[in-house]
Amino acid sequence: MNVLLLLAGLAAPSPEIAAFEVTEDEERIRISGSALEASIRKRDYVSGIEGQSFLDKKTGFRDQGFGLDIVDWIMEPGSDEAYRDRLPGDLPYLFNNAYHGKRAKRSIEGPQICTKAGQLSPRLIRGGDFVAVEQDFTYRLAAPGKQAGSRWDQTIVFPAGKRYFLSCDRITAQNQSDAMFLRIDMPGHIRHREADSFSEVYLSYHGKIPAGEFLRDFPPDERFLYLREPGKAPRRMIRAYHLRDPKTGKDGPWLAGMTLEASAVSEAWCHQRGYVCLIEEIGGRAIRPGESFSAAFVVGFFDSVEEMEEVYDRYAGKIRLEADANGWKLLGGARPPAGAEVRVGIDQGDIRGADSWALQAAVDRAAQLGGGTVRIGPGRYLLRNALTLRSNVRISGEPGKTVLAACDGFRSELACDGDCNERQITVADPSGFRVGDGVAVRDQGSSSGFEVTTATLTARVDERTFTISRPLYLDYMVSRKASAALSFPLVGGWDVENASVENLVLEGNRSTHVPLDGCRGGGIYLFQSKNVTIRNCIVRGYGGDGISFQVSEDVLVEDCLAEGNAGLGIHPGSGSQRPVVRNCRSAGNGGDGLFVCWRVKHGRFEGNEIEGNEGAGVSIGHKDTDNVFRNNRILANKRTGVLFREESEAMGAHRNVFERNLILDNGGAAITIRGRHQDVIFRDNTVGRSASGDSRKIGLSLGRGAPEVRSEGNRFQNVTVELEREQ
C-alpha cells in the first residue's frame, strides 16, 4: 500500500487548506482531507465515488446511495424492439414498465460501466492545494449497425478545505446519432427505509419535495420528470437531498449534485423504485464520429439551498474540467442553442457552394442566430481567404471527407508605399487579386513575425488599388521591396470565444503558397481568442505552421495531425495560457514538431506523437513556465528530441515537467538544455536510441552555466554518455 501526504505548497497548511492523506491499494484509492473523505474503486462497482464512502467531517454524515457520479451506457431516443434479440450483453433496454417508464430509448454502446466494466485504472494527480483522479473506459459493445469504441473520460478534483468535489464526464463518440446522451447518477441514488435516511428532496426546476412522496414506487415519467425544452433551460440545475439520521431523526446537511451548465441535461429522473432513483442524462444532441460532449458538476455537502446556489453561481456555465500537477481548471465551451444548425455543402444544404464565400456565409448566419453548429458536407472547397471563426459557433465537417484547400498563391510588389495605419494598398500587378481575398503585406525590413499585416481586400478603388479590412501595422516601403501576397490561414479566429472547429482536412498548397509564419498565420490560426477547441483536424502542406495560436487562453488541440507543413508543426505562443495539446501527431514538418513560444504557461501536452520533423521534437524557452509534457512519443526528429532554448534566468523556462515520454532516435543529444532554466524535472522517461551503434550518443546535454536538472527514474537506452555538461 502506498501512503502519500500532500501539503498545500511548501508552507505549513492553514486550517482552510489542510493536508490530504491518500492511500492506494489494488481495490481503491482513499482520499482524506480536513473537510471530507472519499474512495474511488478500481474493481467491481466502478466509476465516480464509491457508495457511502463520501464523509462530511463537519457533521459526520455520509452519502446514502450506491455511489456519486456513477456512469452507465451511451444511449439515444428510440426503440430497440426490432433487433433486441441481436443485442449483445446488457444492451437491451425495456420500457413501458415501472422502472424505465414509457419513454422509448435504446443503447448505442455498452456495457454499463459501473456494473460491467469490471476494472478501471484511476490515475492520481497530486497538486499543491488539491488532489485529483482521472479515469477512462472504451466501450466494447455496440448495437447492430453501430461500432464499439467510444471513449468515456472522467476527472474528479478535491479542492483542499472544501466539503465538495468537482467532476466531469466526457464522451468522444464513435457513432453518429441525432440525440446521443450519456446516462449517469447525479448526485446518486438514495437508499432508505420508509424515508428514514432523508427528509426532503430539492430540485431547482421543481422545488422542495417531502420524503413522504417516495414511500411507494412510481415510474420516472409519472412525477418530477425534467425534460429539456428549446430555449427554456433553468437558471440552475441542482438536485439534492436533505440527509437525516435514521436513528435519531435529526436532519443533517444537504447532499447536492449540480450540473454547471443546465442546458447540458436533456432529461433527469427523480422517482421511487425501492430507492429514490436520481438518474440524469447529459448530451441529447446531434453528434458525429470523432465529436465529443461533456458536462461538469459540483457534488458535495451544504448547509442550505442558498449555499448551494452561491457555489453553483461561482462555477456556472462550465462544461469541462481538467487537472494536472500545476492546478485544475473548469472550462466553458461552445454551447449552441438547441436546434440552431446551419448546413453548407457543394450540392446540398441550407447554403450551397464550394468556396470561401459559401462557408463564411454559413458561419456568419449561425453567429447571427446567437450561436450554433455549422455542418460542412463532404467535398473539396477552394479557399481564397480564411474561414473565420465566430464566437459560440461550432464548425464540423465529415471526418476525412470535408477538404478545405488553399488556392494557388500570388505575389505582387506594391506600386507605392503602404503607410502605417493606411487602409488601402496599391499593387503593381493586380491580376491575381480579387475582392474578398486574404493578403499579407510586408517588406524586406518587416518581413516576418508580428511585423506582417494580414487583412482582407474589401473593395476595389481603381485598377490597382484595394481597400483593406484593417489598417497597416507599419510602413511598408517600395524602396525595401514592399509586397502584397495572396496568403492567409485556412481557418482563422481573431478575438473569438467559445468556438470549435472539428473534422476538417486542410490542404495548404505548399508548392505555390507564399510563406506566412506562425505569428500571423497557420493552417489553423488563432489570435487573442479564448475557449477554442480544435479537434480531429488534418493540416497538410501549409506554407507555414500547421496549427498556431497566439495570445490565446484555454485552447484545446486534440486528435489532430499536422504533417508536411513548411514551418512548425504545432505552435502555441505569445503568452498563451493553459493550452492543452493531446493525442495529436506532428510529423514531417519543416521546423520543430512542437514549438512552445514565448510566455506559454500552465500547459498540458499529453499523448502526442512528434516524429520526423526537420527541427527539434519539442522546443521550449522564453518565460515558458509551469508546463507538463506527459506520455509523448518524440521520435527521429532531425535535431534534438527536447530543446530548452538559450535564455537568462530572468527569462527562463522554469518549473517544467517531462514525464513518461519516449525520447528516441533524435539528432544530436536526446535532450539539450541551454540557458538558465530552474526547477526542470525529467521523470520516468525512456531516453536515447532504439538500437545500439558505433557513434557517440548523448542522453542529456547541459550547456555551460545551466542549473542541475532533476532526473528521476529515467531509463537511458543505447547511449554512450547519459549526462554531459559543457565546460
Image (cartoon, rainbow, N blue to C red):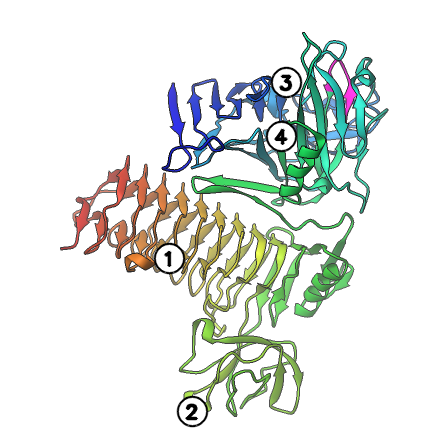
x%, y% of residue 713? 28, 34
Q: Amino acid at mark 2?
A: Ser
**Is residue 140 found left or right of 215 in the rendered image?**
left
x%, y% of residue 392? 67, 55
In which quadrant will I find the N terminus?
top left
Task: Tell me if residue 271 is in the magenta stretch.
Answer: yes
Q: Amino acid at mark 3?
A: Phe
**Mark before the other along the chain sequence, 2 or 4:** 4
**Is residue 615 found left or right of 343 in the rendered image?**
left
Residue 43 seen? yes
Task: Tell me if residue 625 is in the magenta stretch.
Answer: no
Name the one closer to the observer, 605 or 669.
605
Dots 3, 4 in contact, CB < 8 A = no
The magenta-colored residue range is 270-276
Residue 150 seen? no
- The residue labelled by disc 1 is 623
Residue 532 circle label: none
Q: CA distance from mark 2 to mark 3?
A: 77 Å
Q: Residue furthest top?
A: 247
Disc 4 packing (10 Å; few <14; some 14–19; many ≥20): many
Q: Residue furthest front?
A: 15
- The residue labelled by disc 2 is 479
Instruction: Name the residue located 62 percent from the left edge and 68 percent from the top edge.
Output: 382
Helix, strand or loop for disc 4: strand
x%, y% of residue 46? 56, 22
**Which quadrant of the figure has residue 569?**
bottom left
**Mark before the other along the chain sequence, 2 or 1:** 2
Residue 299 circle label: 4
Q: CA distance from mark 2 to mark 4?
A: 66 Å
- The residue labelled by disc 3 is 66
